[in-house]
Image (spheres, coloured by chain):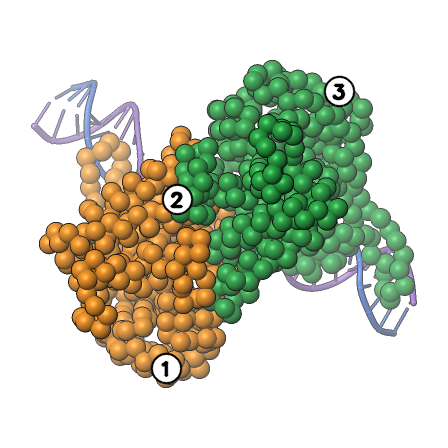
Chain colours: A green, B orange, C blue, D purple
Amino acid sequence: MDPKRKSRHVRITSINSSVVRNINRSIILDAIRVHQPISRSKISLLTRLNKSTVSSIVDTLIADELIAEDIDRNKKIGRNPINLRVKKGIHIVGAISIDPRSTIVAVVDIDGTVKASVTLRTEANAPEAFIIRCLEELTALWKKFPSHYFNGIGITVPGIVDSLHSTVVFAPRLGWEHVDIGRIVLGHDPSIDAVAVENDARACAVAELVFGTQSINPANYIFLSVGAGIGAGIVVDNRLLSGHSHAAGEFGHMIIVENGEQCSCGNLGCWEMYASDRATVRRYRALKNIQPGVKANLCLADVVAAAGRGEPEAVEAVKRAAYYLGLGISNIIRAFDPEFIVIGGRITQCWDILAPGISETLSTCGFLGTRTSAVIVPTSLADNPPLLGAAALSIRKIFTDYKFAL
Amino acid sequence: MDPKRKSRHVRITSINSSVVRNINRSIILDAIRVHQPISRSKISLLTRLNKSTVSSIVDTLIADELIAEDIDRNKKIGRNPINLRVKKGIHIVGAISIDPRSTIVAVVDIDGTVKASVTLRTEANAPEAFIIRCLEELTALWKKFPSHYFNGIGITVPGIVDSLHSTVVFAPRLGWEHVDIGRIVLGHDPSIDAVAVENDARACAVAELVFGTQSINPANYIFLSVGAGIGAGIVVDNRLLSGHSHAAGEFGHMIIVENGEQCSCGNLGCWEMYASDRATVRRYRALKNIQPGVKANLCLADVVAAAGRGEPEAVEAVKRAAYYLGLGISNIIRAFDPEFIVIGGRITQCWDILAPGISETLSTCGFLGTRTSAVIVPTSLADNPPLLGAAALSIRKIFTDYKFAL
DNA sequence: AATTAGTTTGTTTTGCAAACCAACAAACTG
DNA sequence: CAGTTTGTTGGTTTGCAAAACAAACTAATT
């Protein structure tokens, strides 16, 4: 990409011609991404930009090898359009998805294709050394694609992340506090200028926008990540909500039962204590009368598998999870009134048990009886949503330089 | 104002020079509003717009009589700046605040001064006739200010409002459903082109931004309106959240107690059943052992008055309200992670009892022990927040033509 | 000939940079 | 001490560059 293009994502206080160009460029590139294949003419109609303006900007996009022409002949009357598509196999991004157990390092094409990946055991007790290790693995992968443009790295972490400063504020499950990933990456290799660090659930929300097959209207939409904890990525008007201290959407510690079970956070009755994977496993153990200590490494995958076989205790455990998920989701709907809620996590593998349970709870929590509720769907992202999320963080920067509304 | 200026608040799909001008104009006008008095030179530094650009735009603002020059001499070195201020006594807006009991119709200056007002008894059973009645009252008031520019009408309604279509979707306390206020106003007087209808709590949130004295950072902020029900206006990145079906922030029916008290909405354990004014009055009656039927019109004002006198039962009733308010607020903080939560409603009159109770509950719901929480403050708006909200809806349109982010 | 796609040319709007003018205070000067 | 010089800040003028636009043009197809 043209290195003369100034660093984007800077604080804009007013509009000048260069900002105008960049915004319109983003608008056109995004229109191509969403509507591809599309002709210059159609873009002009869609964006209300003048045909000549579209042509001029499209020229720069072709020069940057972000899009490619593709003359296909159709039988319509008039001159055949020159179709424009996002160019694959040219621009790649690095993606690192950190989880308490394992970390995946990958190289991803801008259409979401994982071109290469390695899985590492997470060494959380030495964050800096571990992140550098990941970067070295990434460099090794990247070297396999010498003819590609490298467009930055996206990193997802389960915890509270200050994405503006690329810093992990607090990640209890990793034991990390104030880990400045941006500084570590730049210290390791000053040539890497584009690092995006984000909470895993939020990155999933971005991925669902960038890659998701369910054509989600980006207006109001929440990605709910159900795992060991419960987190969420909230998208409002195409923008990711981050909150004043980067903790928006930390629904796991929403109080759902007054004076309920003691949570590790110190509160009573947190949602996590009732609807997380751990809660489901605990409930399953109780239903099966498995004593503590016995089958200590029983995990949600086992419950899901058992439910798949139709085992009554497992089905019941999932149904109870569905009930409590529904309870919390009803509160989320009250708060945000989203159009969609996309649920991610292993438990979505028994969607046929989960979905009716959630719906039933929501129907008894029907708001004022008449309101339409949000549509609840499982994630459409392939095997590893957080990894695609990490990739999406960087890819979105390519497509949308400027967030602007209305 | 120059009638040649094109209708604002239209859907923008791309940027052209006229959009640039309008955005920069809004930026400058808003800078003047927030930092007044301020010189052209300071605006240039603040906005990074060129001095000549600032001068040129300021000229148009002066021509539109939105701002005025004000040469005051100070002792600093160098040429004395020409201070710019928002011009008062020239531009006015109409404000109508509809409540189940009474409706206030007013003419408000752009600095928030109520210049004239009338209070009507709300005739909710005939919405169209009643709204026309309000418009006639407003016209009568408006005629008292013949030399002023009239900048549109803002209307607040307790209920779910589609502000884009100026329609009341559902207002149970008024018994209104699908009342197209925009159509009614236009049908009555086609010359009125600027009508803004909004939910009362949301309008208050806007008012707090436009008039509020506590210099609120508009990034993340929630106005919580506690009354017969509980509603909220949520501001994120300077933008009002409205939700997919215009019901974002309808916290009153958030479930706070599993299998709790039966609410009129059909659910069990809604927040309103524990923290609204009605709940407080009910609790007070119970504490005082007042039988049903006796003192039937006892209302929150009485409880507040009693608490002010230090009556133990009243103090206890307010304390219980504070506890439940804190419980719900903790969930709101989890969801939005706001910087401020501003509380409005009659109960804030006993802030000295309320605030410690809320804080205490929040401290026991401390998120992961280490996180900073939102700042809870009472509203700074004068006597009638919803009326100022209604005015703020129209005033904001004058100051901020385009909502744009980053 | 009709139709649709895309380019070229010249114009308009806008913001920008630099030089300029304006107004003031403090220091300096005869 | 009056007048002048210097420095500093505020605001305007002038010419220019970047961008989008409109309209006329070319291109390719039925």
Q: Amino acid at mark 1?
A: Asn
Instruction: Classify 10 Å Cα crowding around label 2: few (below 14), some (14-19), many (20 and above).
Output: few
The x and y percentages for residue A237 are: 55, 52
Respond whether the residues carrying marks 3 and 1 are from the same subunit.
no
Q: Secondary structure at mark 2?
A: loop
The x and y percentages for residue B12 are: 56, 58
Task: First in sequence, mark 3 or 2: give its number.
Answer: 3
Q: Residue at x 70, y 22 (%)?
A: A120
Judging depth in this view, the residue of B134 and A16 nearest the camera is B134
Q: Amino acid at mark 3?
A: Ala
Q: Residue at x 41, y 52 (%)?
A: B256
Residue B91 visible? The answer is no
The x and y percentages for residue A101 are: 64, 26
**Residue on which disc 1 sits:** B125
Question: Which quarter of the rendered picture does the C terminus of chain A lie within?
Answer: bottom right
Dot in front, 3 or 1:
1
Respond whether the residues carrying marks 3 and 2 are from the same subunit.
yes
Q: Which mark is residue A259?
A: 2
Q: Residue at x 55, y 65 (%)?
A: A372
Disc 3: which chain?
A: A
Question: Which quarter of the rendered picture does the N terminus of chain A lie within?
Answer: top right
Q: Which mark is residue A140?
A: 3
Q: Residue at x 21, y 47 (%)?
A: B353
User: Separation of disc 3 and disc 1 at Cα?
Assistant: 73 Å
Q: Amino acid at mark 2?
A: Asn
Judging depth in this view, the residue of B269 and A79 nearest the camera is B269
Instruction: Classify 10 Å Cα crowding around label 1: few (below 14), some (14-19), many (20 and above).
Output: few
User: Separation of disc 3 and disc 2 at Cα?
Assistant: 52 Å
Q: Secondary structure at mark 1?
A: loop
Q: Is residue D3 above or below residue B140?
A: above
Judging depth in this view, the residue of A295 and A15 nearest the camera is A295
Left or right for A284, reference B143: right
